[in-house]
Image (tube, coloured by chain):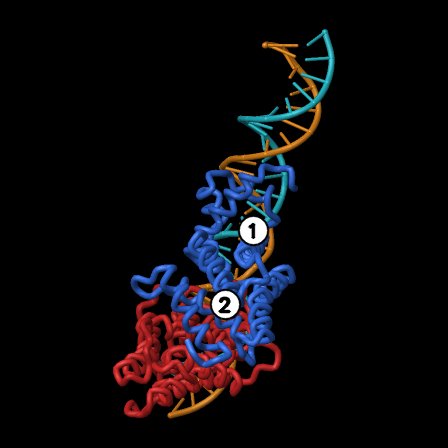
Chain colours: A blue, B red, C orange, D cyan
Amino acid sequence: MQRLDPAKRQEILDAAARLFAARPFHEVRLDDVAAEARIGKGTIYLYFEDKEGLYLSLIREGMSRLVNAVEAQMENPCADVWDRLAAAVEGLIGFASRFPDLFRVMRSGALTADDPELQRSRRELSGLIERAIRDGNEAGQTADPWPELTTQFVLSFVRGAVLYPPEGLTAATLRHHLMVVLRRGIAKEASA
Amino acid sequence: MQRLDPAKRQEILDAAARLFAARPFHEVRLDDVAAEARIGKGTIYLYFEDKEGLYLSLIREGMSRLVNAVEAQMENPCADVWDRLAAAVEGLIGFASRFPDLFRVMRSGALTADDPELQRSRRELSGLIERAIRDGNEAGQTADPWPELTTQFVLSFVRGAVLYPPEGLTAATLRHHLMVVLRRGIAKEASA
DNA sequence: GGGTAAATACTGACGGGTCAGTTTTCAACC
DNA sequence: GGTTGAAAACTGACCCGTCAGTATTTACCC
């Protein structure tokens, strides 16, 4: 299963991302995916179990890439808490800008509730942000009674802004505004 | 089409909400909806155009109820800006708690991108919150350069918390935490 | 290197199951 | 008995997944 051409596999995933981003699961025909990837339909089944397997692989691998991206941005755990949070946000938004289709599919959240691998990835991603906030609490830089909630807030915020972007929103503005609100929202001293 | 028994119509919608909340659109069988509502499948077609029509009606009417609920909470436009925002949040969370299934379906956001009526409702809902913030800006109580983004933040936050609730989260805690972050995040003076 | 055999990769027409939607039958009420 | 609303039975379009067949790549030998 793994000795087939990984580049082709990726092409199929890319094609699938484009189509799944544009329409819901049940409106995407595997014939269309095949056409989009310029291969025969049967080839899909050499690389993936079935339609749902393709969809899950897309999201699983996307999620894992996202976690890596955010982890990479946050690399230095000794850094200032705000820097780490800013890095996490940067990683999230960067990923969303670089892979808009994939991000849409990942965040549309259909069909993915009960996949254990995905749950793990999700927890991992949340954990990265949450840990930064908890460290901030301990270090006295932040005073957040609900780090999980705030984490959820950061993720949801990016999701909302990317899925339903207000007119003329740039990635930079989004990042900046999010950080400003976050800073003021959970900083220990109630000052900007 | 509308003179049939409205109570039965609502029962169908309720049954549909339960099923659509539990599985994605394409995994919900109309036979199951009929069974859940204790009616024959054909009856569905007396009240709704087709499967998608049922789904859209569910979300359209839910959205309209949500807008009304939030509007009702905010009733007095002369009230303090923070009171108005708190009311909006209260309306949102109250709705989500009272109709969890419906809220899940509405916020899962599949299949609903390009319905004009829904777009209108969404804008209306956003508008309520946005207007409060803009009024706050004018009154000098808030200083928010991106009211649309902040609105998105409020909506996303509630969505995220309700769809993926952290362990042991109550509606009251959610409301409180959201308001605290929001207050500190956009208040004119940078004080809590 | 070129000829050929084997392995591997790919294709797309087709079968068949599923389920949305329709038709028929039944029931109730006036 | 006619009308109206509900249930049950039915139909067939649609689309997933298969697989028999084709193409391409690799391996091996002279």
Q: Amino acid at mark 1?
A: Leu
Dot 1: chain letter? A
Question: Viewed as shown, does residue B80 lie left or right of B29?
Answer: left
Tell which of A161 and B117 is nearer to you.
A161
Dot 2: chain letter? A
- Is residue A8 placed above or below B160 in the rendered structure? above
Question: Viewed as shown, does residue B91 lie left or right of A79?
Answer: left
Q: Earlier in the sequence, mark 1 or mark 2?
A: 1
Q: Quadrant of the C terminus of chain A?
A: bottom left
Question: Viewed as shown, does residue A32 lie left or right of D25?
Answer: left
State how far apart marks 1 and 2 are (Cα): 38 Å
- Residue occupying the point 28% across, 92% down: B78
Residue B153 falls in which quadrant of the image? bottom left
- Is residue A125 placed above or below A62 in the rendered structure? below
- Residue occupying the point 57% across, 68% down: A132
**Which callout, 1 or 2, points to the residue nearer the camera?**
2
Name the residue at the left extreme.
Answer: B138
Q: Is residue A138 visible?
A: yes
Q: Are discs 1 and 2 less than 8 Å apart at CB?
A: no
> Residue C27: x, y in percent?
51, 83
Q: Residues within 10 Å of mark 1 (few under 14, many from 20)?
A: many
Q: In the rendering, which numbered label is found on residue B105?
A: none
> Residue A166: x, y in percent?
33, 66
Q: Residues within 10 Å of mark 2 (few under 14, many from 20)?
A: some
Tell which of D3 and A149 is nearer to you.
A149
* Circle 1 residue: A54
Q: In the rendering, which numbered label is found on residue A82?
A: 2
Q: Amino acid at mark 2?
A: Trp
Mark 1 and mark 2, same subunit? yes
> Residue A137: x, y in percent?
57, 76
Q: Is residue A51 visible?
A: no
- Residue occupying the point 46% across, 59% down: A90
